[in-house]
Amino acid sequence: YQRLNPCSAAGLLLSAVARCPLIVEYNGTIEHDGKQALLGGYQEFVEHLNLRYASRIIVISQVLIDELIRRGIQKDRLVLNPNAVDPSRFTGEGSTQRISLGFKDSEVVFCFVGSFGFWHGAPVLARAFVKVADEFTNARLLMVGDGIERSETESILADAGCLEQVTFLGAVDIEQIPSLLESADVLCSPHVPWPNGLPFHGSPTKLFEYMAARRAIVASSLGQIAEVLENE
């Protein structure tokens, strides 16, 4: 069993040597994730070999299944298995965490957890919160994580003059995530479309964490997100 990584033929070689089936976990296309600068051709070749000789291909979203079928992969070799979380990690410690963060019962806390990748849409959330904060003075925004779009997100909130209503925690230990999510009232998944026009193919782990936390969710209607959640 191997998650398909760029240029990696380890699973193929072990499968051949051990004479056992190869199962490949397929999380995204080269077009989505980008080619290696000097190894683009080799990367395409290795991906082709993995997909050709895998007995089963585990795919995280229907978008990717449709894409593989268009590429000629037999449907009976594909298994749809979205990402998931362990709900037993969520133990109801949100009230204690909320107090430690300084949020009042009268405040409505919106929370985002992520790596601030371009597909996460943190700036979109920032612009949306500016509108909410302008109308509701008891609104608060909790941003957990760090990454490439954090500075832009902070700038949007600072320029709007609502940083006093926002808390940035930065990167935290993964064990803290459940209680942080449970400390909020509304959990946000503001994912955005891919800039190259390709369909959103992800299976956001945060979406399932949000569901396990049993809080209200505001999310973009994209790909699997719109399949998992029912509007309103």
Image: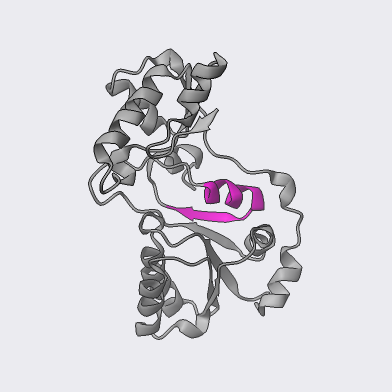
Looking at the rendered structure, the number of numbered marks drawn on it comes to 0
Say which quadrant the N terminus sits in: top right
Question: Looking at the image, which residue is at 31% across and 36% down?
Answer: 43
Q: Position of residue 80 (x, y in %)?
A: 49, 27
Residue interval drawn in magenta: 205-219
Q: Nearer the viewer, residue 128 or 13?
A: 13
Q: Nearer the viewer, residue 197 or 185?
A: 197
User: Which residue is situated farthest in the front direction here?
Assistant: 17
Q: Position of residue 124 (x, y in %)?
A: 36, 64
Q: Is residue 209 magenta?
A: yes
Q: Nearer the viewer, residue 9 or 191?
A: 9
Above or below, 41 relative to 122: above
Q: Which quarter of the picture shows residue 120?
A: bottom left
Above or below, 15 relative to 8: above
Is residue 216 toward the left or the right of residue 9 in the image? right
Principal secondary structure, stretch drawn in magenta: helix
Question: Looking at the image, which residue is at 49% across and 41% down?
Answer: 230
Q: Position of residue 171 (x, y in %)?
A: 56, 67
